[in-house]
């Protein structure tokens, strides 16, 4: 892990952001060659904290880069890949509920997941993402 100094305090729901890291690391481990390094970097960029999860999987065709965050979307139908196809979609919902952005890109000899989180949320808890067609729901778990 490589993080800039000093580290910024980022207002988040710890459990939800932990799930983002679990899902991105799990995805990286599934698609990268066995035994290769997975790195996490983080740095402040203006009014957001930018995180990168970097692995050595094969490049993803450009037309799939935005779709990989859609429910059940898979770039490959490989038999060795297990899971429901929801992990990256869940990441997107969590990051967007925190007011951030998430995307992926092919790097030179690597694949990168990026996400940003705002450094300030005006004291509000993040909204819980709503599924399409759910109607009105409370935005806070305690309500």
Image: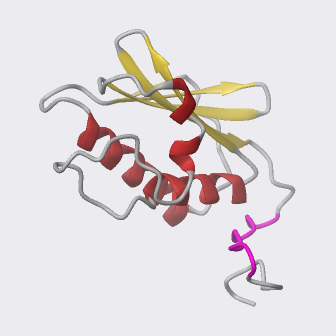
Which region is colored magenta? 124-133
- Residue farthest right in this picture: 122
- Residue farthest bottom in this picture: 143
**With respect to residue 116, does 81 lie above or below?**
below
Q: Looking at the picture, tell me which residue is in the foreground, 74 or 110.
A: 74
* Picture quarter with the C terminus: bottom right
Task: Identify the residue at horizontal 60%, vertical 36% (top origin).
Answer: 103
Image location of residue 93, percent across then percent down: 63, 59
**With respect to residue 118, does 123 lie above or below?**
below
Task: Identify the residue at horizontal 41%, vertical 45% (top origin).
Answer: 24
In which quarter of the view is residue 132 placed? bottom right
Q: Is residue 125 magenta?
A: yes
**With respect to residue 10, does 103 lie above or below?**
above
Image location of residue 78, percent across then percent down: 23, 45
**Residue 102 shown left or right of residue 28 in the figure:** right
In which quarter of the view is residue 139 placed? bottom right
Task: Identify the residue at horizontal 81%, vertical 65% (top origin).
Answer: 124
């Amino acid at each position: 892990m490589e993080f800039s100094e000093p580290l910024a305090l980022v207002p988040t729901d710890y459990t939800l952001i932990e799930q983002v890291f679990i899902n991105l690391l799990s995805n990286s481990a599934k698609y990268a060659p066995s035994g290769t390094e997975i790195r996490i970097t983080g740095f402040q960029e203006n009014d957001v904290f930018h995180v990168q999860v970097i692995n050595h999987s094969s490049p993803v065709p450009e037309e799939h880069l935005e779709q990989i965050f859609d429910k059940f979307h898979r770039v490959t139908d490989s038999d060795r890949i297990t899971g429901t196809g929801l992990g990256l979609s869940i990441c997107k919902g969590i990051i967007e509920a925190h007011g951030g952005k998430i995307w992926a890109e092919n790097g030179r000899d690597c694949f990168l997941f990026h996400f940003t989180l705002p450094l300030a949320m005006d004291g509000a808890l993040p909204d819980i993402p709503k599924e399409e067609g759910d109607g009105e729901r409370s935005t806070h778990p305690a309500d």
